[in-house]
Amino acid sequence: MVDLNAFNALIRNKCGLRFEKNRMNWLKESIINRMKFCGLSSPLQYFNLIQVDTVEFTNLVNLLTINETYFFREQGQLSLFTDRLVPMISKKISGRIRILSAGCATGEEPYSIAIALMEKYGPDFDKRFSIAATDIDSDTIKKAIAGVYSGNSFRKFSESLMDKYFSPTDRGQYLVKDFIRTAVYFENTNILACTENPRFKDMDVIFYRNVSIYFDCETREKALENLKKLMREGGYLIVSSVETMSNDLGILHPIELDGFFLYQKTSDNWKSHDYKTTQSITKHHDITRRHDVTRDHAITREQDMYRETVTGKAACTATLPLTDVRVKPHGTSSMKLPGLPNAYRIDEPTEIVKEKKTSVNGLNTEDIEDLIEKSMILINEKQYPEALHTVDTAIAMAPNSARAHMLKAFILFNTKSFRQAGEVCLKTMALDQWNYDAYIILGLIAKQDNDGKEALKRFKEAIYIDSSSWLAHYHAGDTYSVLGENDHAEREYSIVIKLLEKAAGGLGPTLFYRTFNSEQILHLCRHNIKQLRKLRGT
């Protein structure tokens, strides 16, 4: 039997690629394929081989990576680059503008950049611009250098440009003409380990599109830190529209230009927020809020997002909220939320009562609160093993503490222990049926498993608990988009906008471990509404 977890961990550690549950079969098939090619019958033998044989490890990575791309993909970003960024950069620097296509796959992107520049700036464009491209897959780099493409790569490419920049071959394919092909420098390099390469230094613009979707949050941070080192001060990073929010990790400054979101390297140690105030999870306060269900539900219900215009894997685990808000709909007695397993139902919502200063295992409740506070400090510092040990101690002392269980679920989720996190969420819900975070985490776990219906159910339950929270609306909308139900997207974005505007620029009572300020969320929602209206032709 193939131990996929061991292979997954090795591949992640070496090159940052991750394989979630829905892609494990592809990982297994690729391993078996390479084992047969190498004449090996034991997965352990192959595992030991790829640890020492860099060529075979590269062969496996080449098989695993998906290189689906085409010319002039997300053409709006190319126009933004040629029409707006290039003139802005030209005013600040002398010499050639340096451009990098990071994760270039088979080369359609860097050649598209070269073609767009020539169209805008003429045949001497190569004297004004330096274009480099890199990918971890050595096979795709060879294809990119060869510059031969079939019809599928031209799905959004005009015939006039085909005649101008490509020559037909006798095999029914098309070859990039030399004056474009020689304008791009290709190299087989891992972006997690390319900071010392002089060819990639002082970049003015880096295209980093549809690459980070394969990374978990830790790897995404490392990749962004490396790319930042390659950038000139004031340089720009362009990501795909589905990766905008998931790359807002406080490393580069997000900006909006002509309705597009991109990132810029700045010198002022910019962060999305003042992390000392908004990210310091050092104290939780019990908040009891009563809710007028009729009033709240007038603002809510079905929702959707168009995935190509927002954050695909936006729910990077780093964006998970950590709240301590207890919400109880007004006038309820034996209310039961839909979808909660019978084993975990509670007839009467738990009242929030100040714990008496009693002794538990020789420690009073103040000691328990200290442990919870300590665990939150450790979470803030991303010392998850220590935080888990601390919160487990608190749970041992106070096994009915919903807050301690919720912290444990949060830690487990952020360390990718999704099954265990889900189990702890159910325990939390048994102790506190109205725990908003438990439903959010269960929804995000379902998204990780590509179970859109289950995810949507959980986000709806979170909305039922607190329909005034934009977060559940946002994640539910993302899930609707995955399910292909786009009709409600504009309404849901509008709800998020109304909620944030009503909060006067705040994000409500939810604390975020990683977060976005309200202006960024508002910009994204407004941008996505525009895109949805374009799709409808209105």
Image (cartoon, grey):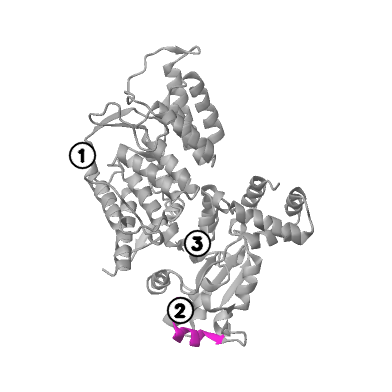
User: Mark 2 touching mark 3, by CB under 8 A?
Assistant: no
Q: Gap between marks 1 and 3, in whole Å?
A: 42 Å
Disc 2 residue crowd, few under 14, some 14–19, many 20+, Cα 10 Å: some
Q: Is residue 209 above or below residue 122?
A: above
Magenta region, residue range: 156-167
**Secondary structure beneath disc 1?**
helix
Q: Gap between marks 2 and 1, in whole Å?
A: 52 Å
Classify residue 18 as left or right of residue 425: right
Q: Nearer the viewer, residue 246 or 420?
A: 420
Q: Amino acid at mark 2?
A: Phe
Disc 3 residue crowd, few under 14, some 14–19, many 20+, Cα 10 Å: some
Q: Is residue 239 above or below residue 472?
A: below
Depth-wise, is mark 1 or mark 3 nearer the camera? 1
Q: Say which mark, if any, is on residue 210.
A: 3
Q: Gap between marks 2 and 3, in whole Å?
A: 19 Å
Magenta span has 73? no
Position in image of residue 536 (x %, y %): 30, 67
Depth-wise, is mark 2 or mark 1 nearer the camera? 1
Q: Say which mark, if any, is on residue 157.
A: 2
Q: In the rendered image, which quarter is residue 339 located in?
A: top left
Q: Which residue is mark 1?
A: 294
- Could one spot residue 337 in this view of the protein? yes
**Secondary structure beneath disc 2?**
loop
